[in-house]
Image: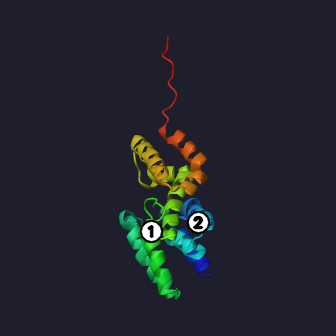
């Protein structure tokens, strides 16, 4: 119930005319993060509502204002607290969701944090690996990187995130990772010398 209302609110923000992170971000990032979070929550016995709410809200500050991107984990956690208080969510659940969002930026190992936080951080990385088209758009269309800077950033994003994933997450996106690594790391085939 709360998760659906939060999902709708985030969807509406992404649908706003002129939103820098619009519906493509919703469909190509937030939806995959929610799906991978649900898959890992079922496998690892985590609270499915906490993981769903955390997934929908984990980047909310950047959705509202893309200039907050460098501090979006912390600011999204603060914004989530506000939204969940307005919906009368129990304080201990708000605290847990806030912890998940605050610590989502790199994949966390098992037992380092609450399992829901481990799941969100891994699901976020899995979605980045599985949706190379969106992140290519992000590098060149949103961040306006040069070809080589963008290619390097994308290759290192995929490689560094994949190498930090927990085992069950790695198994789910192994083929996506191979595909993305091939795209971002490969140079075009050499043209044979003329003559
Ligand atoms: Fe994210």
Q: Is residue 47 visible from the viewing direction of this image?
A: yes
Residue 72 placed where, x, y %? 40, 67
Name the quadrant containing residue 106: bottom left
Q: Dot 1: few (<14), some (14–19), or many (≥20) neighbours within 10 Å?
A: some
Q: How many marks?
A: 2
Residue 12 placed where, x, y %? 56, 73
Q: Cβ(mark 1) to ligand 1 < 8 Å? A: no
Q: Earlier in the sequence, mark 1 or mark 2?
A: 2
Answer above or below: position of 148 versus 121.
Answer: above
Name the quadrant containing residue 31: bottom right
Name the foreground residue: 169 vs 70.
Answer: 169
Tags 1 and 2 touching, CB below 8 Å? no
Per the image, label 1 sits on a secondary structure element best described as loop
Q: CA distance from mark 1 to mark 2?
A: 14 Å
Per the image, label 2 sits on a secondary structure element best described as helix
Name the foreground residue: 143 vs 81.
Answer: 81
Residue sitting at x 63%, y 81%: 1
Disc number for residue 168: none
Name the foreground residue: 155 vs 51.
Answer: 51
Residue 84 placed where, x, y %? 50, 83
Q: Is residue 64 visible from the viewing direction of this image?
A: no
Query: Of all residues shown, which one is farthest toward the front?
Result: 111
Name the quadrant containing residue 6: bottom right
Query: Mark 2 highlights which residue?
Result: 44
Query: Of all residues shown, which one is farthest toward the top?
Result: 195
Residue 46 appears left or right of 95: right
Residue 175 appears left or right of 155: right
Residue sitting at x 55%, y 52%: 170
Q: Cβ(mark 2) to ligand 1 < 8 Å? A: no
Residue sitting at x 52%, y 28%: 189
Residue 122 placed where, x, y %? 51, 60
Query: Mark 1 highlights which residue?
Result: 113
């Amino acid at each position: 119930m709360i998760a659906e209302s939060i999902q709708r609110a985030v969807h509406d923000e992404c649908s706003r005319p002129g939103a820098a992170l619009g519906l493509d971000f919703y469909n190509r990032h937030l939806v995959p993060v929610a799906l991978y979070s649900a898959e890992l929550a079922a496998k690892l016995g985590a609270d499915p509502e906490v993981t769903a709410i955390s997934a929908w809200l984990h980047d909310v500050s950047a959705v509202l204002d893309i200039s907050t991107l460098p501090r979006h984990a912390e600011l999204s956690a603060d914004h989530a607290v506000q939204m969940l208080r307005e919906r009368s969510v129990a304080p201990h659940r708000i605290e847990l969701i806030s912890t998940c969002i605050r610590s989502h930026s790199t994949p966390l190992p098992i037992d380092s944090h609450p399992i829901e936080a481990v799941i969100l951080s891994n699901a976020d990385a899995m979605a980045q690996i599985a949706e190379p088209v969106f992140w290519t758009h992000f590098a060149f269309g949103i961040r306006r990187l040069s070809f080589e800077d963008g290619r390097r950033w994308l290759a290192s994003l995929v490689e560094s995130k994949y190498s930090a994933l927990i085992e069950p997450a790695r198994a789910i996106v192994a083929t996506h990772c191979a595909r993305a690594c091939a795209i971002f790391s490969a140079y075009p085939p050499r043209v044979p010398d003329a003559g």
